[in-house]
Image (tube, rainbow, N blue to C red):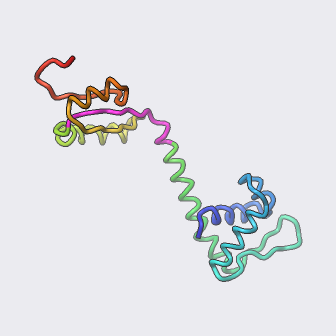
Amino acid sequence: MRLQSLQYFEKLIELKNYSNVAEAFHVYKSTISREIKRLENEAGCRLVVHNPKPNELILTSAGEKMHKYSKIIVDQLSILNNETKECQKRLKINLGMPPMINNTYFPKVAVHLNDKTLINLNIVDDNSVELIKMLKRGDLNITILASIEPIN
C-alpha cells in the first residue's frame, strides 16, 4: 500500500468529499478517486460507500478496519515529519577532528550537544593536515586538531 493513498483515505474520511480532499492535497479529484480505488483493490473489497447526499460518506466494515490502522500510520508520519522539521531548524555545524579525539573523547560530549542544544553536529573524522585543508576551503566550520607544533 502506498502511504499517499492512506493519507488520501484519511483525509476523505475527515472531509467526506473527494473534491475537497483533492483541493487539500493540490491534486485532481481523479487522483483521489484512483488512489482510493487502488486501496480497495489491494484490500480486495470496498472501503467506501458513496452516498448520494452531499458531504456524507459511509465506510464499510473493511473501511472501518482500514481506517483504524491507516489513522495510526498517518498520525505517526505526521509526528515524524514534525520531529524532522525540528531537527532541520537546528544550526548545522561541520566539526572536524582526528580519529583519536573523535573515538576517545568526543562521543561523551556529542551526545549532550545533539540532544540538549539547537546544534546539529556533522562530525568529519580525518587527519590534521586534511582537516586544515577542509577548514580553509570552508567545508568545516570548526576543527579540533592534535598537533604539538604550531600550525600555519
Q: Is residue 16 left or right of residue 40?
A: right
Q: Position of residue 33 (x, y in %)?
A: 76, 67
Residue beneath the point at 77% across and 53% down: 23
Q: Is residue 83 left or right of residue 16?
A: left
Residue beneath the point at 71% across and 73% down: 37
Q: Position of residue 7 (x, y in %)?
A: 64, 61
When the figure is inspected, residue 93 is found, relative to residue 108, above or below; the finding is above
When the figure is inspected, residue 26 is found, relative to residue 18, above or below; the finding is above
From the viewer's side, name the closer residue of 140 and 106: 140
From the viewer's side, name the closer residue of 22 and 152: 152
Q: Position of residue 13 (x, y in %)?
A: 72, 65
User: Quick check: is 55 in the magenta stretch?
Assistant: no
From the viewer's side, name the closer residue of 26 and 105: 26
Residues rendered magenta in the picture: 86-98
Point out the image quarter for the C terminus. Answer: top left
Residue beneath the point at 32% across and 23% down: 136
Q: Position of residue 69 (x, y in %)?
A: 58, 70
When the figure is inspected, residue 2 is found, relative to residue 135, above or below; the finding is below
Q: Residue furthest bottom?
A: 44
User: Quick check: is 88 in the magenta stretch?
Assistant: yes
Q: Residue furthest right?
A: 53
Q: Is residue 76 left or right of residue 26?
A: left
From the viewer's side, name the closer residue of 15 and 38: 38
Residue beneath the point at 82% across and 68% down: 56
- The quarter of the displayed image where residue 141 is located: top left
- The quarter of the displayed image where residue 126 is located: top left
Point out the image quarter for the N terminus. Answer: bottom right
Number of callouts in the render? 0
